Every structure is written in C-alpha cells, then in structure tokens.
Amino acid sequence: MHIEPSFRKRYHKALSDTAMLKAVKNGTGRLRGQRATAIEAVGAERWMEFRNRAEAIRMHVIQHLDQYLEQLIDNVLKKGGHVCLAKTGEEAVQYISELAKKKNAKSILKSKSMVSEEIHLNPALEKQGCKVIESDLGEWIIQLAGETPSHIIAPAMHKNRFQVADLFNAVSDEKIPTEIADLCGFARKYLREKFLGIDIGITGCNFALADSGAITLCTNEGNARIISALSPTLVTIMGMERILPGLEELTVMLSLLARSATGQKLTVYNTLSTGVRKAEELDGPQEFHLVIVDNGRSKQLGTKYEKILNCIRCGSCLNACPVYRNIGGHAYGWVYPGPIGAVLSPLYQGMDKYGELAYATTLCGACTFACPVKIPLHDMLYALRNDKVELEKKGELAEDIAYKGWSATFASMSRYRFSIRMARRFQFPLVKAEKIAFGPPPISDWLKHRDMPALPNKFFHEIWPEMNKDRKE
Amino acid sequence: MAQGVLTGNREAFFSTIRQNIKTPPGGKAPRVENPMNGLFTQRQTNIEERRELRERFIHEWTTLGGKAFSIKNQTELGQVIKQIIQERQLHRAMRWDHPELEKLKLEDIFADTQASLSRWPLEKNYSDWIGKAAAMEAGIVWGDMVMAETGTLVLPAASPGQPASISVLPLTLIAIFTTAQLVDGFAGVVKTFKERYGTDLPTTTTFISGPSRTTDIEMVLTIGVHGSRFVYALILDEGT
Ligand code: SF4
C-alpha cells in the first residue's frame, strides 16, 4: 500500500474531499445511533456487565495466549487441518502463495480479512497470476476502486451510490442504474458466478475456539459462509490474538460484537467451522489451512499496550471519534483507521512511520467509552505521544521555552492580565467578524477548519466587580 | 482422518510470546468463571413457556425481515408451503436429509404443485452437485435449535445430509421446526452443544438471524446480498 509522506498531507487531502466527508459523517452517525439504541435495549447496567465480562475474558486469553494457541493448533491438526505459524507477514504471504501455486489456483475468493490487508496478500497473489476477488460488497467496491478500506466494519463508507455505479459499470456489460437495490442485485449476480468457480477460498477469522479448533466467521451478507461451504481448499488467516477458550466465551463476544458494530442483536450469519469436511460430506473444504499471524503482536504482550490485543475489531471507536469523523479512514495511512488504528499502526509498523497518529485525537475519551472490551484507547494515545517525544528527543528546546513562558505568564495574575490586554490590543489585524480569521502557521492550519472567537472588549474579570456590586446591593 | 501438517517453527513462534507473557508458560489457567452467568437466561422450559418463546421468536424474526407461521397440523403445513411456493414462484427446491423432515412428507406437498423438491445429496461429486444446487430457488432445513431472544436458527450440520449449502445458496430459505426446539438464547444452545458434542463440534454450525443484509452502500439497508433474501420459519406445535 502506498503511504503518502506524512499524516499532515493525508489529512489535508481528506479535508478537501467533501463528498467523502459527508458520507463518513452520515455513516458513522447512523452506526452510533444504532449502537446507542441496542445498548439502551440491553440496559446500561447490564451492558457494563457485558463489557466487564468481555474484558476479563480477553485479558485472560491474552495473558495465557501460549496455552490457548497450543490447544488450538493441536485441535486443528487433529481434525485434519493444516496450520502455518507465521512470525511475519511475509511468511504468511509466502505460505499462501505457494499453496496457490501448488493448487494451480486461478480463482480466489475472499471474505473480509483485515490481516490480509495488513500483510498485502492480494497483490502478491495477483502477481503470480491468480484472480483475487473480494466477496464482501464493501470490500469489493473498494477493490474495484483500487483503494483500501476506510472503516473496519463498512469499508466503502466513504463512497456514494453514484461512485459505486461507476465502478460497477466498468465491469458490467449492461448499464446499471444508480438505485442501491439495483447495485446490490448486480453484485449478487456477478459474484454468484465467481462463488461457483472457487479454487481457493480465503477468509479472516473473527474468533478461533481453542477447545474445539473451530473458526468463527461473522458476516451479514453470508459471503464467508458461502466461501467456507463451496471452497475445495479453504485458507483462514487469523491474527494470533483472535482466540477464545470455548463456546461460552464466544457467546459473550458475539453478543457484544454485533451490538457494538451495527446495533444488531447478532450478526446475520455466524458460522462455526472445524475445517475439513468428513468423509461422506459433500460440501465444505477438502483441505483447510489455518494461518496464524504474529506480525508484531507478540511484542505488545507484557507491555503497557498489551490490552490493544483485546480488540475485537467492532469499529465502534471509529464512529465515536471526532477526529475520524472529520478526516475519514484513509488519512490514517495504514490498514486500521480511527483510534484503534492510531494505536495499532505505530505499534505494528513503527513509531517513525506512524507516530504522528498519536496526535490524531482530542483525548476526549469517547473511544475508550465506546470500546466494548474496555481498551483504554485514549490513555494509550497519550502514552504513545510520550514515547514519541522520548524517542525523538526533538523540538524539546522550542517546547521548553514555549511551556516555560506559558507557565510564567499564567502563574502571575498581573502578568496574565497584562498579556491578554496586549493580545486584545494587537489582535485587530487578525480579526474579521469577531473571529480570529488569520494567523501565522500553525494557527493558520487550525483556523481553516475551526472558529476561534476574537478576544472580547471586556473580559469576565473586568465585568465581575460590577456584577458583584449589583448583587451585593 | 489424517492429522494435518504444521508449517513454521513452533519454538520460534512461541519464543517472544513466552518471553513477554506475564504468567509462567505451560500452566493450565482456569477459565474466567461462568462467563455467561447473569448475561443470558438459563432455564428449563415447559411446553407453555416454549409457546411464549414462539411468540418472542416470531416477533424478532419478523423484525429482522423474515416471515413466520405457527402451524397446527400437517394440513396447515401443506397450505403454508403451497402459499410460499406460489408467493415465491418456486420451481426447484432442495431439502436436508433429516428424519424430522422425512416425517412431514414434503415431497407430496411439492408434488401437488408445479414445483419439485430434491433431497440432499443432489449428486455424488462436488462438480456434479454445485451447478444443481446453485439453480435451486429454495432450501428447506430443520431448525435444530432456535433462539427466541435474537430470532436465530441454529443449524449444526450433524450429518452429511445436512450441509450448509442448502441454507445459504438459494434465494429462499424455509426452516421448519417445532416449539420443542425453542430456547431463550445462547445459554440453552451452549448447554445442548456441550451435552451432544462436547468439544467435538460438527464440521459446520450456522447461526442465522434473518435474511442476508448489507448497508455497504450509503448505509442503506438492502436485503439479499449473497445469502437468502426471503426467509420463512414454519413452527409446528409440539403439543399436537
Ligand atoms: S478498540 Fe475497541 S472499539 Fe475499537 S475496534 Fe477494537 S474493540 Fe472495537
């Protein structure tokens, strides 16, 4: 994936894309509303109990990850499935590419997998002549557009139906109307044919169950379920943390995932699959490969960021985040956008490339509040900022002077009053319609998207004695 | 079944995990105690209570966009199926090979109309059945377990005659079950699973809550992308 040089450039580009911003605001607003309704139906207290339980389950798994992974691996192998342990993304890609070669695979159908985006699987497979098709409608739309997902749950949230119609028309012989029902009808017809000729199916993994070796796939469209039923060879790629002890824990997570993501009580299709079909069975894969990917995850264990591995990819922190809502997903530059992306990207991809994302936050805490598994996202963003400063030891002098000046001014009543009187007197070249309209960088950047009121003719501390006099009288 | 093959260095893969993990490796940690307790209803139900659950299921299922029918007897079952055949203009349907469906003589009902009903397996080989299955307009399954609180069919492929394809490939899904299959929600399903399968789960189990849906384009709800567009639940009364 191409990464623009800086976060600054990326968000500038995003801020000028009004159609995208409108679509993202609309989409996140709806998802937030649906989630709120779902939680109201559960009741705030019970919802909190759900979250507490989910957090405990996730923490337990993460702290005993070796135990559960070992159990999962043994169970999958026992049931005839193959397991690939990939320490890096490259190892995972190599394994799947070799498998595709061995199977002489021409047509590969995928259901949504964030890990596959993370490891750049599609380009690698396409390079060796495979036709890779995303079967999730949103994923397919962005694949046709040559883009990456902009949201975890609704990857094509940033596109409107006219843009989608253009993309579909490029692969259709007939002209497709811009009505949403027609667009979905075309997708069904087009992709159905592809489903029937799958050589290899690739899915992500919502949760793997250690005690049975079952893989759980959750989709509303049913595409993952069709893929797991129709693929002669099925590959499931899982981030190594996406594991649960068993069915009981799964039920808690499925209930939370659907409500947090889209406000549903349950996702329409939740499939539990143990891999290879039995001797007399006719549907289901003849060959099953589980690719367990580390790719930087194990480094988070035992650190202050360990809880990030609790994430169940529900996307609700994105919908809650005022920054995400104003810049969309692509501005984050890597696979995971929003608050979860702002934490994961520097952790997995390096502070040098993505450390700036820790500043893509207002530290309002809305993400932490929204997170069903109680990941303290805004604390982590704050910690990442600290780490970045520590790591770079850069700009310290300028910051030191600025903060020392600030504190010296605000610590003294007379200096404070003098400074704001001066500011009021000399602000006039910058003021337009009672707002600060101009300023030097970085204030100019800030002002492009926000209003800053001009300093008033009278400050509160100047009005207060008079008000107080009236009150006393 | 032959054991699968492990690729990659197990020791190397686990080394960073074990180095960084807080708890000492190798120990068997007890699971979080009763994770479902207090979150899901756990109870045994009698016939009357299950009839109440039927109403709850019907409410949830129809809210999700499905259609549900309470059915008293075989005659009514025939009428409802014929109504669906007409409503959906069905010509070809397939069904699970399931003893409970066998008893209902569905082939006779279909024979009374223009439509035909095939029983799985449709053919002996993948390449033979796949085309046939894709041409089917409806799939009929037995609702093995049904969760009322979420309007969810739980379909474990308990035998080779009960594949996932039947419930997801055709545009129309018809699930038949009696009130005896109804439970409140997850607690009931997990209990049955534990008793029946332990940790040796069937190859596939599918939880279906309504028709296939997407909101991927402009967040507008559209029904029937990939999976079933029309979903029917036919609920027979266990007491009659
Ligand atoms: S961090 Fe929390 S809210 Fe964000 S995607 Fe992960 S689980 Fe959901």
Image: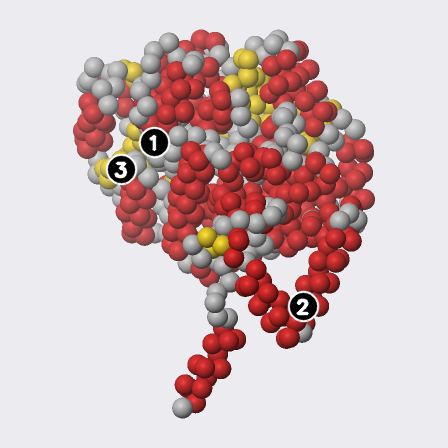
Residue at screen point 56% across, 10% down = A106
The three-letter code of the residue at mark 3 reads: Ala
Q: Nearer the viewer, residue A89 or A211?
A: A89
Mark 1 burial class by Cα count in 10 Å: few <14, some 14-19, many 20+: many
Identify the image quadrant of the C terminus of chain A. bottom left
Cα separation, mark 2 vs mark 1, equals 59 Å
Q: Chain of mark 3?
A: B
Residue where numbered disc 2 is placed: A409
Residue depicted at 69% across the width and 42% down the height? A355
Report in which chain the residue with disc 2 lies.
A
| Residue at left offset 43%, top offset 47% | A32
Q: In this figure, which residue is indicated by the disc labeled 1?
A: B222
Residue A362: x and y, percent?
Answer: 57, 52
Q: Does the Cβ of the disc 1 residue fall within 8 Å of ligand 1?
A: no
Residue A462: percent from the left, percent from the top? 51, 76
**Does B163 sit left or right of A52 as displayed?**
left
Q: Which residue sits at x=43%, y=13%?
A: A171
Q: Position of residue B177 (x, y in %)?
A: 33, 36
Question: SS at mark 2?
Answer: helix
Residue A175 figure quarter = top left
Question: Is the residue under label 3 in contact with that under label 2 (CB below 8 Å)?
Answer: no
Q: Which residue position is annotated with label 3? A: B68
Question: Crowdedness of circle 2 by 10 Å Cα count: few (<14), some, many (20+)?
Answer: some
Left or right of A119 on screen, residue A446: left
Q: Is mark 3 within 8 Å of ligand 1?
A: no
Q: Tell me if A7 is positioned left or right of B133 in this view.
A: right
Residue A375 appears in the figure: no
Do we see residue A191 in this rendering? Answer: yes
- Front position among marks 1 and 3: 1
Q: Are tags 2 and 1 found on a single chain?
A: no
